[in-house]
Amino acid sequence: MIVYRTKNDLTRHLDTLRKSGKSIGLVPTMGALHRGHASLVKIAKDQNDAIVVSIFVNPSQFNDPADLEAYPRTLDLDLEMLQGLKADLVFVPSVQEMYPDEVIRTFDLGNLERTMEGAQRKGHFQGVAQIVSRLFETVAPHRAYFGQKDFQQLVVVRRLVEILGLDLEIVACPIIRDEDGLAMSSRNVRLSREERKAAPFVHITLQLAREKRGSMSPAEVKMWVELRFKEQPIMKLEYFEIVEDKELMPVTNWGEQVNKVGCVAVQLGKIRLIDNLIFD
């Protein structure tokens, strides 16, 4: 495993691989790696001749400076995990390396940045698009790997590939959960013992909501979920939406010929939990 900290050094290595006909996979991360990230690395390893795992806490996607400051940083442990997973290349750039000037592009993401996470976190997806576009330009991968837990981000990245006109496959990887159903997230380590005990309620509610398709309309399911969270004083529901998977527009009828996804965000103490479940 080789660790690079500059784009020039990384691209020189990748150019050599590319000239020899090797396929390249990219796994973008913000570090604080867990089993969810490990699953992405394993899938990427299976599908490519060489992979790049990036570790970069991207400041442009944080709309809350306190959240950026509190984000866990565990580089030594991350590198140890990646060594065990036999990652080929690890890219650990500085902020100055990724943002050397003040030139900031904007991308027309349409409804994708106005709903759900976009509505709650103004500018977040423009920040995601900034760093992902720069990683794509640096690595020029054949495939890039993203977890389905951040479902809206996955849809945004696919839109970004269309905007940039890239010949790049975006591979969606399944959500990895703890035994009690909680979707794995780097932020979970910041939950208190009481909060961690309560957290599986989110996934349980999604599962129960999906089961109510036969007896309730989408609007009624949404009302049922909202009422259910009101009975949980330790949690605050930010949103629950049932949306289609292209433009993230609300589903109003189960008969609509679209892929339906239930998406939820909850404030639990100082931590936001997001999760989703395919409703088809």
Image (cartoon, rainbow, N blue to C red):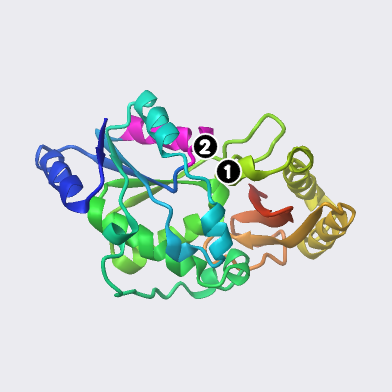
Using residue 242 as the reference point, say whether residue 184 is left or right of it: left
Above or below: residue 184 compared with residue 241: above
Is the residue marked by circle 2 packed among few (<14), some (14-19), or many (20+) residues within 10 Å?
Answer: many
Judging depth in this view, the residue of 77 and 218 nearest the camera is: 77
Task: Identify the residue at horizontal 42%, vertical 29% (top origin).
Answer: 81
Extent of the magenta region: 32-47
Looking at the image, is mark 1 or mark 2 nearer the viewer? 1
When asked about the image quadrant of residue 66, the answer is: bottom right
Farthest right residue in view: 231
Three-letter code, disc 2? Gly
User: Which residue matches tag 1?
Assistant: 185
Task: Identify the residue at horizontal 68%, vertical 64% (top origin).
Answer: 251
Is the residue marked by circle 1 packed among few (<14), some (14-19), or many (20+) residues within 10 Å?
Answer: many
Using residue 274 as the reference point, say whether residue 156 is left or right of it: left
User: Which residue matches tag 2?
Assistant: 36
Pointer 1 or 2: first along the chain? 2
Please state the horizontal and vertical placement of residue 134, each as a whole percent of the image: 30, 60
Task: Identify the residue at horizontal 49%, vertical 59% (top origin).
Answer: 155
Task: Identify the residue at horizontal 68%, vertical 57% (top origin).
Answer: 265
Please state the horizontal and vertical placement of residue 121, each as a whole percent of the image: 58, 68
Above or below: residue 100 compared with residue 8: below
Q: Are marks 1 and 2 in contact (CB under 8 Å)?
A: yes
Please state the horizontal and vertical placement of residue 261, each as a whole percent of the image: 63, 54
Q: Secondary structure at mark 1?
A: loop
Above or below: residue 35 compared with residue 25: above
When asked about the image quadrant of residue 13, the answer is: top left
Using residue 163 as the reference point, say whether residue 70 is left or right of it: right
3D distance between C-alphas at marks 1 and 2: 8 Å
- Image mark for residue 64: none
